[in-house]
Image (tube, rainbow, N blue to C red):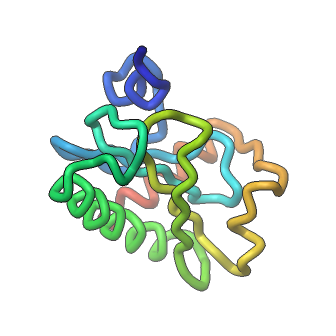
Amino acid sequence: MATIFSKIIKGEIPCYKIAEDDHYLAFLDINPLVKGHTLVVPKQETDYLFDLEDDLLAGLTVFAKKVALAIEKTIPCQRIGVAVLGLEVPHAHIHLVPLQTEADISFSRPKLKLEKEEMDTIAANIRQHL
C-alpha cells in the first residue's frame, strides 16, 4: 500500500516542494515544529532508513545537506537539526528543523498552523538558495 509520501512523490497529494531530483524529494512539513521544517525522502518506497541501499542512503544525506544549507540561508537559526524517527509514516525520511534552541526539535511540542500563503512563501524563499 502506498504511503502518504509515495502519493506526494507521484503528485497525487500536493506539497510545498523545496527540491527534487530523480531519486529524492524535499518538501515542507505541513505540521511544522518551526517555520522551515522540511522533510527529505527517497522516491523509492522503503519503510526504514537503514534498509536503503548504501548508495541511496549516502545520496539522501548529500541531498539533505544541500537542502539544509538553503534553509539556513532563509530561516534565521543557529543551525539545522536533523531527526530520523520514521514511526509515523512507513517511508524513510529525514526531518530538517531550523534551531534556535534544542527545544525547537522536540516532537512533543505543539505544531505550528501556518496559512497556505506563508507556506508558499517559505518554500519559494528556500528554493531561491538552492
With 80 as the anchor, is 27 left or right in this view? left
Whole-percent x, y for residue 65 in the image: 34, 70
Q: Residue furthest bottom?
A: 78
Q: Residue at x 76, y 49 (%)?
A: 112
Query: For residue 88, which quarter of the picture?
Result: top right
Q: Residue at x 34, y 30 (%)?
A: 9
Whole-percent x, y for residue 120 in the image: 53, 43
Q: How many marks?
A: 0
Whole-percent x, y for residue 47 in the image: 41, 37
Q: Residue at x 43, y 37 (%)?
A: 91
Query: For residue 67, which quarter of the picture?
Result: bottom left
With 124 as the anchor, is 58 left or right in this view? left
In which quadrant is the C terminus drawn? bottom left
Whole-percent x, y for residue 117 in the image: 61, 40
In-front residue for pair 119/14: 14
In which quadrant is the N terminus drawn? top left
With 46 as the anchor, is 118 left or right in this view? right
Q: Is residue 36 above or below residue 31?
A: below
Query: For residue 104, which quarter of the picture?
Result: bottom right
With 66 as the anchor, is 23 left or right in this view? left
Q: Residue at x 39, y 50 (%)?
A: 49
In-front residue for pair 35/95: 95
